[in-house]
Image (cartoon, grey):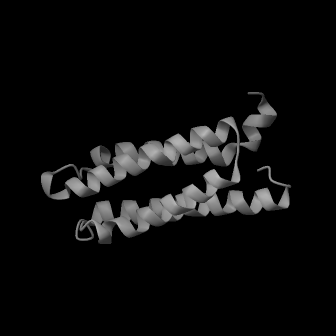
Amino acid sequence: MNTLELKSHWREWLMLLFGVWLVVSPFVLGFTAVAEGMAMWSAVILGLIVAGFAVAEIMKPREWEEWVSVVLGAALIVAPFALGFADAPLALWNSLIMGVLVGGDAIWSLVDMKHHGGHAA
């Protein structure tokens, strides 16, 4: 990958960073206890999926992968309430903030793809 390609894929690299953060965040922020198990597994599993799609986007950007990332962002926002860890503040805010960042990054990429004829800039 040359420098121009690296610059044009910065949002995908950022999304990869978001995925990695989600995977390690339960251990860094300390919500790995049994009572917060759903929060931990939600962050780890969704983080692995976010990271996987980011790597796929780095290799070859496709619009449908960005739509999946929008859904992943929404899932992160809904997860604390659907999975019952809304009463764990660190896990709640981590999931909400990362949901907004993941979904926002994906929407930004979709808008950019529309303006550049299907290719993210």
Quadrant housing residue 9 = top right
36 on left or right of 56: left
87 on left or right of 54: left
Residue at the far front in the pictured view: 64
Q: Nearer the viewer, residue 66 or 105?
A: 66
Height in image: 43 above or below 79? above
Image position, residue 99 (x, y; %): 47, 62
Count of numbered marks = 0
The answer to whether residue 21 of the structure is visible from this angle is no
Identify the residue at image location x=70%, y=39%. 60
Quarter that holds the N terminus: top right
Image position, residue 119 (x, y; %): 80, 49
Identify the residue at image location x=56%, y=62%. 70
Identify the residue at image location x=20%, y=53%. 37
Identify the residue at image location x=76%, y=43%. 8
36 on left or right of 8: left
Residue at the far left in the pictured view: 34
Quadrant housing residue 95 = bottom left
36 on left or right of 114: left
Image position, residue 22 (x, y; %): 40, 49
Height in image: 100 above or below 8? below
Q: Nearer the viewer, residue 27 or 46?
A: 46
The answer to whether residue 113 of the structure is visible from this angle is yes
Q: Nearer the viewer, residue 80 or 24?
A: 80
Image position, residue 91 (x, y; %): 30, 60
